[in-house]
Image: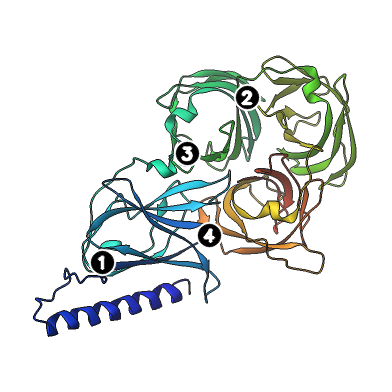
Amino acid sequence: MRQIFAGFSKVLAVVLAMVVLAACAGGGGTGGSSVTVPGMTTATVTGSITGGTFAAFDATTGMAMGSVAASADLSGGKSFSLPLPAGRTYKFYIIENDGTASARVFPVYWGATNKFAVLAITAVDLGFISTVTGVAQSGNDPTKASGVTGSGEDKTIPGALAGSAFAVSDLAGSWNVQQITAGTGAGWQSSMVSIDASGTAAAASYESSAGSGTTPSVTYSIYPSGVVTFPGGTGTGFRGIMTKDKSMIVGTISPAGGDYAMIVMCRGGATYGQADLQGTWSLGQLITGASPAWTHGYATIDASGTMSITGETRSSGSGSTPAATLTIDATGSVASNAWTSFSGVLSQDKNLMVAVATNPDGTFSLMTLTRTGGASFAAGDLVGIWRTDWLSAGNGPNTPYYGSALFASDGLVNDAYGDIAATMTSIQLSSVAQADYALTVALSSTGYASFKNTDYFGAMSIAKNLMVGIWTESNGSPSLYVFVK
């Protein structure tokens, strides 16, 4: 149903082309698909996307040739139609969150081709363009249109988009890596990884719930959209997303058959002091191992590092996070006196803490503390497209898994309380596609988020480009969700 509008535009463009050709034939012209008539040299490009802007650039000069924001169509999707001069070679782009600090650039491909020569008056229907991977993949082959040929690949980004695009150099630096695993190999791992300008990370020592060891050397890749990958484990390896400030990478991997893990990487380089821990925080915690669970609540850390938790809720209905004193060193590494094994890190902006630990009962935790206070929030802060990753810890007969999706909202009010509509779309559960999931979302003035008719509890970052929360899946599995705009 996504193609109703696109199909209509294609038929209309073809009819116009036939009228032009008939006029040429009547005037003694030669006819044919490459005929040109003053004022009638336009090719029409159509398609549909989750949301954002469709833009076309001259592949030779890098000149912007036109752009259009996708709008709602009769099928409930978002479609676009863009007229372009024939006789040029183009590169197409999808820009999500266009015009904001969170803009992301996705080059449009058909297979391995992202340059298309449009040599005639024609209609090019790209179909539904998916941005699930690091690039945008056209649902239809553009070269099936009359007068259109593929012209290979060109990875260079036009100057007008370069400021919003990521490059491999953005990976360079030292990263504090925290990993929590669910499944038969449940546990945690913490390491400091150094990535060079080519994306290669040398072997590094790590500490884990099972002891110490050495990580293998791997080469990271990053797409202009900020999607990060590296090989390893089972399946497709690691896939995650870099935040727009380039200080954090969040993603998932299957390290071994039947095991699923979430990885959070925080860039090093800032200088920290004990005062950076002081304040109010939203607590979210995913517990893996023999007794999977989640917990959430409100945390206060005083000047001495003492953390007090109030309003704590656990999916298991019992237990509590131990009282703790947290300390931080100059590199941002956080330690605690309440766990025998604990490794934490504070983000560069000092508004998110991520820690892994072995609990007294032998289970394992990934703890997040999202700073609250210092900003006022409104429903409009949810508008846009967010890349979403989560880890489900499993529960009883339910096995663990990881997931990814796009969280998209136009900010349309969905109920009498001013809550807004959103959709989880392009959902993948352990790489298996799932149907879209509609949501009604409430965001408090203090940044706490909830999804109507679910137990989701989350908090938005002060920068309004990150949201972390917990959620019980329909099969009872506790999950930790991270949304990156």
Q: Is residue 461 above or below residue 70?
A: above
Q: Give the label, 2 or 1, closer to the camera.
A: 1
Q: Is residue 165 above or below residue 359?
A: below
- Which quadrant of the structure image shows residue 29? bottom left
| Real-space CA distance between mark 1 and mark 3, rounded to the nearest whole angstrom | 33 Å
Q: Give the label, 1 or 4, closer to the camera.
A: 4
Q: Amino acid at mark 2?
A: Ser
Q: Earlier in the sequence, mark 4 or mark 3?
A: 4
Circles 3 and 2 in contact, beta carbons < 8 Å? no
Mark 4 falls on what kind of element?
loop
Q: Earlier in the sequence, mark 4 or mark 2?
A: 4
Q: Earlier in the sequence, mark 1 or mark 4?
A: 4
Q: Is residue 141 visible?
A: no
Q: Amino acid at mark 1?
A: Lys
| Real-space CA distance between mark 3 and mark 2, rounded to the nearest whole angstrom | 32 Å
Between residue 95 and residue 328, name the one nearer to us: 95
Residue 21 drawn at (x, y percent): 19, 79
| Real-space CA distance between mark 4 and mark 2, rounded to the nearest whole angstrom | 37 Å
Residue 405 drawn at (x, y percent): 57, 53
Q: Which residue is mark 4?
A: 51
Q: Earlier in the sequence, mark 3 or mark 2?
A: 3
Q: Give the label, 4 or 3, closer to the camera.
A: 3
- Which quadrant of the structure image shows residue 287? top right
Q: Which residue is mark 3?
A: 163
Q: Give the label, 1 or 3, closer to the camera.
A: 3
Q: Which residue is mark 2?
A: 190
